[in-house]
C-alpha cells in the first residue's frame, strides 16, 4: 500500500503518513533548527525531491535508506518537477524557471516567468510545463523537450495552482483572490490558444485541486472558505461542498477517503466520503502539498 509524503513549511522535516495505520513518520531534511520552508515535491526512481522556499538548496531523499543529499542552487525554490534527467525548479525571488542537469550537477537553462511563480505542473502528453505566477495573474507555458518558452496565458486574480487535464489540452486554474473578502474562481483554459473556456465562482481562496477521473469530478480546497468544493466535470458546476474545521491546502483522494492538509491546524484530515466520518492525523507545522507513493 502506498504512503503519503507531506511538505511542512514551518518544520525541517517531511511527514510520511502510512495509509495502513495512519501514523506519521518524520523524515528530516536537516537536523538544524532553522526552518527550510519545504513547499513542493516530486518522486522519481524511489527518490523524493523537495523544493525549499527558505533555503538555497533543493533536497534529494532516498526513500529506502533515508539518506538525504542537498543540491546547491544559490536561490530559493517554490516547486520542482523531474523529467529526462533534468530538474525543473521555479524560483519566486528571481521570477524564473531553472533547468538543472541532475547528471552533471549544474544549471543548464533559465527561462523567464511572471511575477512570483508559486507552483507548476508537467504534462507528458503535450510535453509542456505550466508555471503558475501569482502576482501578475499569469500562467507561463514551457516546452520541456526544447527547454523553451511557449506562451503566457492571462488568468483571473492571484492564481495559486494550475493543472493539466489528462488530455493535455486543457488547464484548470485555482484563481484565489487571496487576501480579498470575496470568493475565488475556478477556470479552464485552452493550452493551444490561451483562451478561457469556462469559469465558475467557488468559496474563498481556492488553492489546490484533485481530479477524480473515475467519478468525473474535481475536488477543490478553499483555503479561507474552510471548505472543499466538489465539481461535476460533465456540467462544470459545483454540486456539493464539504465544510472543514481549518484552512485546507493540499488535497488527494484514495479510494473512499479524501486526504486534506489543514495548514493552520498542523494536521492531515482523512475524510470518509461515504460516511462523512473524519479522522485527524498529526503532521509537521503548516503542511502544504502531498504526494502519494
Image (spheres, rainbow, N blue to C red):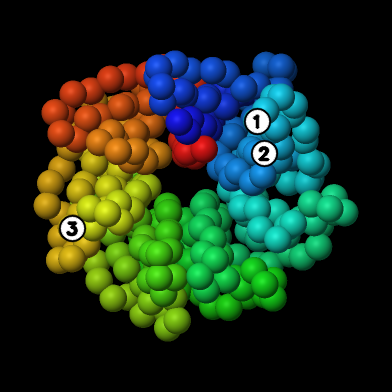
Residue annotated with mark 2: 47
Q: Residues within 10 Å of mark 2 (few under 14, many from 20)?
A: some
Residue at image coords 47%, 38%? 292
Q: Is residue 67 left or right of residue 220?
A: right
Q: State which quadrant residue 85 falls in.
A: bottom right
Judge whether residue 101 can be spotted in this image.
yes
Q: Is residue 89 above or below residue 59?
A: below
Residue at image coords 45%, 81%? 192
Q: Residues within 10 Å of mark 3 (few under 14, many from 20)?
A: some
Q: Is residue 278 left or right of residue 115?
A: left
List x then y, in percent, for residue 67. 75, 26
Residue annotated with mark 3: 232
Q: Is residue 234 above or below residue 25?
A: below
Q: Which mark is residue 63?
A: 1
Marks 1/2 in contact by CB < 8 Å: the verdict is: yes
Kindly state the secondary structure of the residue where label 3 is placed.
Answer: strand
Marks 3/2 in contact by CB < 8 Å: the verdict is: no
State how far apart marks 3 and 2 are (Cα): 35 Å
Q: State which quadrant residue 274 falls in.
A: top left
List x then y, in percent, for residue 219. 27, 48
Q: Which mark is residue 144?
A: none
Marks 1/3 in contact by CB < 8 Å: the verdict is: no
Residue at image coords 24%, 41%? 228
State how far apart marks 1 and 2 are (Cα): 6 Å
Amino acid at each position: 500500500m502506498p504512503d503519503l509524503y507531506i511538505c511542512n513549511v514551518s518544520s525541517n522535516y517531511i511527514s510520511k503518513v502510512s495509509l495502513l495505520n495512519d501514523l506519521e513518520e518524520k523524515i528530516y531534511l536537516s537536523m538544524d533548527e532553522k526552518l527550510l520552508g519545504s513547499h513542493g515535491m516530486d518522486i522519481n526512481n524511489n527518490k523524493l525531491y523537495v523544493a525549499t522556499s527558505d533555503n538555497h538548496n533543493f533536497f534529494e531523499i532516498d526513500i529506502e535508506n533515508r539518506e538525504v543529499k542537498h543540491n546547491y542552487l544559490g536561490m530559493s525554490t517554490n516547486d520542482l518537477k523531474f523529467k529526462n534527467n533534468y530538474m525543473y525548479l521555479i524560483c519566486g525571488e528571481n521570477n524564473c524557471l531553472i533547468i538543472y542537469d541532475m547528471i552533471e550537477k549544474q544549471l543548464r537553462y533559465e527561462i523567464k516567468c511572471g511575477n512570483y511563480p508559486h507552483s507548476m505542473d508537467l504534462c507528458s502528453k503535450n510535453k509542456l510545463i505550466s508555471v503558475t505566477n501569482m502576482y501578475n495573474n499569469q500562467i507561463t507555458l514551457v516546452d520541456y523537450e526544447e527547454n523553451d518558452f511557449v506562451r503566457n496565458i492571462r488568468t483571473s486574480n492571484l492564481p495559486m495552482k494550475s493543472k493539466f487535464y489528462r488530455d493535455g489540452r486543457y488547464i484548470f486554474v485555482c484563481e484565489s483572490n487571496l487576501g480579498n473578502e470575496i470568493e475565488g474562481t475556478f477556470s479552464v483554459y485552452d493550452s493551444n490558444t490561451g483562451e478561457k473556456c469556462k469559469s465558475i465562482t467557488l468559496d474563498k481562496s481556492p488553492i489546490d485541486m484533485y481530479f477524480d477521473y473515475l467519478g468525473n469530478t474535481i475536488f477543490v480546497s478553499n483555503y479561507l472558505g474552510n471548505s472543499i468544493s466538489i465539481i461535476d466535470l460533465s456540467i462544470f458546476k459545483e454540486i456539493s461542498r464539504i465544510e472543514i474545521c481549518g484552512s485546507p491546502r493540499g488535497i488527494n483522494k484514495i479510494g473512499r477517503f479524501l486526504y486534506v492538509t489543514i495548514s493552520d491546524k498542523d494536521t492531515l484530515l482523512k475524510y470518509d466520503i461515504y460516511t462523512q466520518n473524519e479522522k485527524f492525523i498529526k503532521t509537521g507545522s503548516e503542511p502544504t502539498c502531498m504526494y502519494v507513493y
